[in-house]
Image (tube, rainbow, N blue to C red):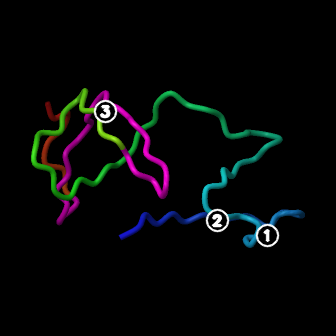
């Protein structure tokens, strides 16, 4: 399975959906341009992992052809992958 990202492009004078390709960064360059970041919040789905996932865990993420080392600084919640219901808040 591959990641699926949906992007809605509002009608702009010089932008067509066909102009946007995989790997490009999109944003409003005049009013709110994309910026580099040190951290972000993400929902991560872990399918089969032999060990424990915890704050401080440092996996290598594969996104298309990029391999990026990251570190989980905090786990906010644990969610049941079948029902989507919260199992545990702030798991250790």
Q: Which residues are magenta?
A: 61-84
Q: Is residue 92 left or right of residue 8?
A: left
Residue at figure coordinates x 79%, y 67% from the top left: 11
Of 26 and 86, nearer the camera is 26
> Counting other residues with Cα less than 10 Å from the Cα at mark 3, is it few (<14), some (14-19), or many (20 or more)?
some
Q: How far is the residue under mark 1 from the one under mark 2?
A: 11 Å
Name the residue: 16% across, 57% down.
48
Query: Residue 7 location, x and y as percent?
Result: 60, 63
For the point 43% across and 41% down, the residue is 68
Q: Find out whether the residues at labels 3 and 1 contact each other: C-beta distance under 8 Å.
A: no
Residue 23 screen position, x and y as percent: 61, 56
Give me the residue at 38% from left, 34% from top.
70
Residue annotated with mark 3: 72
Q: Quadrant of the C terminus?
A: top left
Is label 1 in contact with label 2 (beta carbons under 8 Å)?
A: no
Point out the frontmost of discs 1 and 2: 1
Q: Of label 3 and label 1, which has the lower sequence position?
A: 1
- Which numbered disc flags the more N-terminal residue, 1 or 2? 2
The earlier-in-sequence mark between 3 and 2 is 2
Residue 4 vertical placement versus 78 (above, below): below
Task: Give residue 81's position: percent from left, percent from top.
Answer: 20, 60
Q: Which mark, residue 8?
A: 2
- Give the position of the N terminus as an image quadrant: bottom left
Task: Give the image location of residue 13, x and y in percent.
Answer: 89, 64
Assess whether residue 91 is covered by the magenta stretch: no
Residue assigned mark 1: 16
Q: Please, what secondary structure does the residue beneath circle 2 have? A: loop
Secondary structure state at the residue bearing disc 3: loop
What element does badge 1 sit on? Answer: loop
């Amino acid at each position: 399975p591959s990641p699926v990202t949906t992007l809605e492009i509002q009608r702009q004078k010089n932008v067509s959906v066909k102009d946007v390709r995989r790997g490009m960064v999109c944003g409003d360059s005049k009013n709110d341009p994309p910026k580099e970041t040190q951290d972000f919040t993400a929902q991560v789905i872990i399918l089969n992992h032999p060990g424990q996932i915890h704050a401080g865990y440092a996996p290598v993420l594969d996104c298309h052809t990029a391999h990026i080392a990251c570190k989980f600084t905090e786990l906010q919640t644990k969610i049941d992958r079948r029902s989507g219901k919260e199992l545990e808040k702030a798991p250790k």
